[in-house]
Image: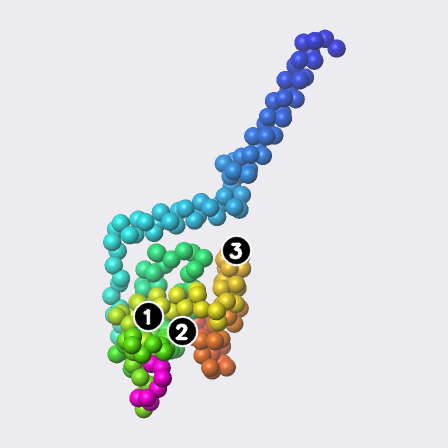
Amino acid sequence: MKPNTFRTIWQVLLLAFLLIIFLTSSFIGGSFYPNKWTVEKLEEDFHKKEVDRVALLGLQEPEFEFDGPNSFMDAVGKCVDYINFTTDRRSRVPKSIIIAMAGVESAWGTSRFAKEGNNLFGVRTWDLNSPHMKPLGIPDAKFGLKMYETKCKSIKDMINILNNHPAYEKFREERAIQIKQGYWDYQKLLEGIKAWSTNSKYTKMIYATIVDRKLP
């Protein structure tokens, strides 16, 4: 074999090797064909920029105005959208579940606790030094129902409870699975919030509300 021919073959092999290195590194880094890790990292960075942008814009909590179940659902939805601006996507709770729970727990905003304490979910407190309301007819109860400055703050607290309380760990685990799948299965998610009520049919009631009200 002539030296020039040998040199040409070696150069071709070297170029092929370098091309393989480039393609492999591009895939790993995500510059040529974004892999799953890279996509998630980009989404996380993008969301952080969104949160920072919202803070700079100084967006304010929406007014909570309603005159019936339909407008109540709209008001809850607006609050959820507002809260989601500053909530990591992995910590968000499906809007339909929040609306259904708020409707059932507060009788669509007409309960005493909703009207006087902005408490849409019947959240209790055992810290009687914090703002609270006692259940009617039980003035000596060792607990009270939390009072909130606004109804949107009640929604924010509800989301915080689902995200942090040990009783809802299964909810968080199932949510993580469904986020990866890319779609919600409300019945499976609701299995993780049974602790919210002593009513054994609570989760079925919430799911029925989602279906009956045609929530997305």
Q: Amino acid at mark 2?
A: Met
Marked residue nearer the N-terminal end (3 or 1) = 1
Main secondary-structure element of the magenta-colored stretch:
loop
> Residue at coordinates 50% horizontally, 67% vertically from top-left?
169
Label 3 residue SS: helix
Q: Nearer the viewer, residue 192 or 110?
A: 192
Q: Amino acid at mark 3?
A: Lys
Residue 168 horizontal/vertical position (percent): 48, 69
Total number of numbered labels?
3
Residue 19 % position (x, y): 59, 27
To which residue does mark 2 refer?
101
Tell me the quadrant of the picture where the N terminus can be found. Answer: top right
Measured from the top left, where is residue 198 in percent x and y?
A: 46, 82
Query: In the rendered image of this protein, does residue 111 appear above or below residue 191?
Result: below
From the image, state whether disc 2 or disc 1 is nearer to you.
1
Near mark 1 (Cα within 10 A), the count class, few <14, some 14-19 or many ≥20, is many
Secondary element at tag 1: helix
Residue 14 position within the rendered picture, expressed as x and y whole percent measured from the top left: 63, 21
The residue carrying mark 1 is 154
Residue 55 visible in the current orientation: yes
The residue at 70%/9% (across/down) is 3
Q: Label 2 neighbourhood size at 10 Å, few (<14), some (14-19), many (20+)? A: many
**Relative side of 58 to 8, left or right:** left
Q: Which residue is mark 3?
A: 180
